[in-house]
Image (cartoon, coloured by chain):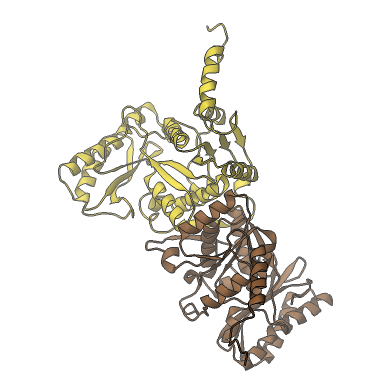
Chain colours: A yellow, B brown
Amino acid sequence: MDPKGPGRKDKTLEKDTKASRLATRGFFAIMRVIESVREMQKCSETVRLSGKKIGFVPTMGYFHEGHLSLMREARRISDFVVTSIYVNPTQFGPKEDFSKYPRDFERDHRMAEDTGVDVIFYPSNDEMYPPQYQTYVNVESVTQNLCGASRPGHFRGVTTICCKLFNIVKAHAAVFGRKDYQQLAAIKTMVADLNLDLDIIGMPTYREKDGLAMSSRNVYLSAEERKSALSLIASLKHAQRLYEGGEKRAEFIIQEAEKIIRQAPYTDIDYVKICDASSIEDLRLIDTQAVMALAVKVGKTRLIDNHVLGEAFSI
Amino acid sequence: MDPKGPGRKDKTLEKDTKASRLATRGFFAIMRVIESVREMQKCSETVRLSGKKIGFVPTMGYFHEGHLSLMREARRISDFVVTSIYVNPTQFGPKEDFSKYPRDFERDHRMAEDTGVDVIFYPSNDEMYPPQYQTYVNVESVTQNLCGASRPGHFRGVTTICCKLFNIVKAHAAVFGRKDYQQLAAIKTMVADLNLDLDIIGMPTYREKDGLAMSSRNVYLSAEERKSALSLIASLKHAQRLYEGGEKRAEFIIQEAEKIIRQAPYTDIDYVKICDASSIEDLRLIDTQAVMALAVKVGKTRLIDNHVLGEAFSI
């Protein structure tokens, strides 16, 4: 056993790590956790008035490398990094996994600090949705298809909470993963339509070495289900091969992709679709930039993934 | 006839007026007109970074003293005053007066300049609602009653355009008239719910000497209709007398108020209601702060007015 006891580290190493963390941190010497809207707004206003740029990564917590890669990008493009941890109830349906969504604030805190985040915004439900709450932001068209069809009200919850968070954090830029492709499209549309003055940056999907898209929900998967979940990336890669071989018929590519997923045990397809990459409308013939998007239940866990046909795969 | 010709003024006087205007103006030596969202945001960001406070008066133009009183309040509480002139199509129903709503930009420009406004934001419809526009802000509960019931979609248009304008003008405070009582309630609710970081200030209704609430739509009224329109303020004053005499039954006060309006020619009541002043829900017994609100067609012109029972009348 380590003589310094579990969890203790070599002092010198700790110092070095901290020094390099502080060198990349923006404003405060230590990472702050802010729970109140008013305090977050005051903090952000001060940072803005000092001429610094705020980069923001909204999350539901339970961090994995995908989240951290977004924080690193925020760090790279801005002077002050805020991440929010909030499992937003209004984007979960009544039968969805809101209450059992994985949470581990201590671990998230440590990971954010090590990644050079300046502030974690960590509000309560009462802070975000006080009694008499009654305002919602609806993005009407790009939210109709895909998860919008499978999860009624989901995107209304997503765009509403993002609108709130953008107003609270007052960021110059917000960084999102492209794994939630339709979510990113809805947020970009909202930001353009409501004239929110911030940049929305979409980063490539972060994947495990074997190609599974990183997701906080992956912890739900049993070892057997974890293997079956690889059928998602396999189907996207097969679709890419067909497309690059000249196939333009969406229906044909979809059928081939579905075959791969159905061959894997424990899978239950919600949708496999090929859409216009901007409008998220179904395509019959792939004659414009197209995204293949899929949602599949593996055991009890609903996983999503997507790929813009013709682009390189990210790992 | 004035030997200097119509419209010409004594030079010395003109200079003095200009000097006093410039003394109260915030940032630029002359009032600017900005038509682009991007330019307005850049201007406002520069003003904010200089540490100055922005006061904002959103309008549909065709200014009267009511508008100017709001601009003066904005001037009083802030360093830099922006007013917007935009007849917002999304808050008009298909059979309403969007196309014939009165407009006179030259006159508005002169009046705003004389009142010490720094910037008029004057966007086109294409600038505000480009093709593919699809995002709307819904305040659900306080918009149900009164004009929300009579004008479906009206408040969705109002809250959406205000959300956009607040994001464009980046104001610290926005000033509204209380004549549009439910509009003010909807905007306050939206600002609180979406965590927009600005103060919403409601100013007393500005009235003509005889009590008619000032409105750009008053120009539609013929001389005869103008007289009948006084039944609105008369009914509010009668309601106030009854309330102050101890009457608590909303229904009784409403009936008495309606009698007064019906006695005036050319009038057609849309609604006369007594509501909770915060939730805008109908009251049967006046046991909390209550607003009497009414909408009446006088000839072809729909007029609204309101009064918080127990408060002093504004003139």
Disc tally is: 0
Q: Is residue A246 above or below residue B157?
A: above
Tell whether B185 sits left or right of B250.
Answer: left
Report x, y in % for residue A188: 42, 51
- Asked whether A60 or A221 is in front, the reply is A60
Q: Is residue B289 above or below residue A185?
A: below
Report x, y in % for residue B62: 56, 77
Tell whether A313 sits left or right of A173.
Answer: left
- Asked whether A293 or A297 is in front, the reply is A293
- Asked whether B258 or B108 is in front, the reply is B108
Report x, y in % for residue B215: 62, 78
Report x, y in % for residue A247: 16, 46
Q: Is residue B47 visible?
A: yes
Image-quadrant location for residue B54: bottom right
Image-quadrant location for residue B107: bottom right
Tell whether A69 sits left or right of A40.
Answer: left
Q: Is residue B177 visible?
A: no
Image-quadrant location for residue A309: top left
Q: Is residue B186 above or below residue A298?
A: below
- Asked whether B76 or B213 is in front, the reply is B76
Quadrant where the N terminus of chain B lies?
bottom right
Residue at far right of view = B245
Quadrant where the C terminus of chain B lies?
bottom right
Residue at far left of view = A246
